[in-house]
Image: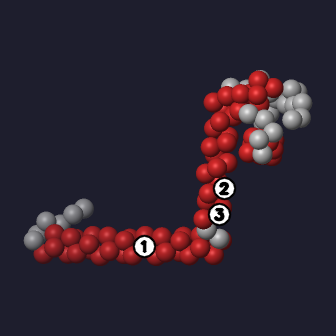
Amino acid sequence: MTDNNEIKRWTAKRKAALVKELIRGQTTVSEAARAHDLKPSEVQQWVDEAEAGMENALRANPRDVAEMYEKKIDELTSAYGEAMLELKARKKLSRYLGQDED
């Protein structure tokens, strides 16, 4: 493990390096926290975030993610269109019933 006692700001790159050491078994959460004057819960949170990111990275390739977002945009566009049609229908009904809205 490297001696990073002078590190005051933990960049994503430095956090990743420490998490890699933990994953490789080169150190433990407790040892890393002590060595870098951090709380064990903070170090564990970095590990948890890395694991979540790793799972997402392995779950989908960029094409799958793009398709997922396109599908979501289509769903939202459709819902917006339906809401606009309903609003127009309500306004027409209000006018028909003599309940004009300002």
User: In the rendering, at what x and y percent does residue 66 appear?
Assistant: 60, 73
Q: CA distance from mark 2 to mark 1?
A: 28 Å
Q: Determine the residue positioned at 16% across, 69% down.
A: 94
Where does label 1 land, which residue? Answer: 75
Relative to residue 94, is residue 29 drawn left or right? right
Q: Determine the residue positioned at 62% across, 57% down.
A: 55
Q: Nearer the viewer, residue 26 or 90?
A: 26
Q: Amino acid at mark 1?
A: Glu
Give whichever of discs 3 and 1 has the lower sequence position: 3
Give whichever of discs 2 and 1 has the lower sequence position: 2
Give the position of the N terminus as an image quadrant.
top right
Asked if the residues shown at circle 2 and circle 3 are in contact, with their CB atoms under 8 angstroms apart, the answer is yes
Q: Nearer the viewer, residue 63 or 23?
A: 23
Disc 3, SS: helix
Disc 1, SS: helix
Where residue 22 sits, quadrant-wise, is top right
Asked if the residues shown at circle 2 and circle 1 are in contact, with their CB atoms under 8 angstroms apart, the answer is no
Q: CA distance from mark 3 to mark 1?
A: 26 Å
Where does label 3 land, which residue? Answer: 58
